[in-house]
Image (cartoon, rainbow, N blue to C red):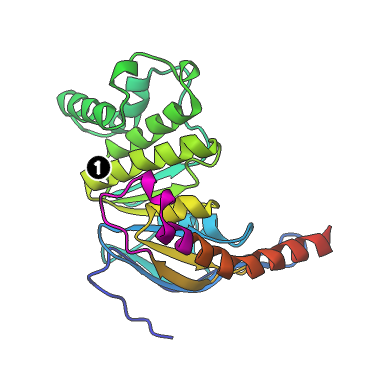
Amino acid sequence: MSEQHDLTAHVGLRGVTKVFRGADGAPSVHALGPIDLDLRRGEFFAVVGPSGCGKSTLLEVLAGLSQVSEGNVLIEGKPVGGDIMDGVGVVFQEDACLPWLTVYDNIAFGLMQTDTSRAEIATRVESALTMTGLSGFAGSYPAQLSGGMRQRVCIARTLVLQPRLILLDEPFGALDQQTRLLMGEELLRLWRATGATIFLITHALDEAAMLADRIGIMSARPGRLLEILETGWSRDRDSRLVETAEFGAVTARLWQVLRGESMKSINRDGARA
């Protein structure tokens, strides 16, 4: 297996494998890999796969929240260590809003932990409020917002840190189908405005098909990349893509590859029940 990295890539993974060692005599779980992958700078890359295939583990490895068992990961040419690197932002599915803070203060929270001046914090927060359509809710509290708006707060809190790589772990998973499509449009708009590289984990094939330039399709555990599908969409795409035959062809291909892998996961988990 080649250990060479594409030095022009934003992110490079080579031979990445993750094994969770069992405690008290329990068997180890080979969760992930081996995986080789290069992410192009400024692209929108999505990953889909059956339940339990290691999608979130892969994101945690990229974020530096989980150490690989084998292989190596480089971001902007630097090895990923045990912490989230400068220039990397992470948004999870769980509502991470702090309920005792206003929308403005939630968004400013991460910046307040740095030596950024108050004037610069105000400028960045106001910009993020505008970009995410939350300017009219700066003084509101999370309990006064819808689920979609709270997720926008979490995205805005990441954007103010000006990350060059944004890792998203099913950020719209708790939302209904229509809201997910509209939130997807917002995410595409933010992606175009920031120029960041985005790595999205999702269980929704239509979401991956609409948002991504390329889609990595993972196998049942241990998760490996079976195929990388290039969508060919224009950069200024929106949810009207779902009306096209080309969109249907992309989602059909995703399901064609995933159906058998999903059956493997169901049968494996059922046999252990």
Residue at the location (41% across, 18% down)?
101
Q: Let me know if residue 233 is in the magenta part.
A: yes
Q: From this viewpoint, which residue is outermost toward the bottom? A: 1
Type of amino acid at the residue the image marks with label 1:
Gln
| Quadrant of the image containing the N terminus | bottom left
Residue at the location (28% across, 26% down)?
129
Q: Residue 107 is drawn in which quadrant? A: top left
Q: Let me know if residue 63 is in the magenta part.
A: no
| Quadrant of the image containing the C terminus | bottom right
In the foreground, 68 or 5: 5
Q: Is residue 64 visible?
A: no
Vertical placement of residue 58 versus 239, above or below:
below
In the foreground, 117 or 151: 151
Q: Residue 13 is drawn in which quadrant? A: bottom left
Q: Residue 221 is drawn in which quadrant? A: bottom right
Residue at the location (28% across, 46% down)?
191
Left/right of residue 90 with respect to residue 165 in the rendered view: right
Magenta-colored span: 231-250
Residue at the location (57% across, 63% down)?
255
User: Circle 1 sits on which residue?
Assistant: 162
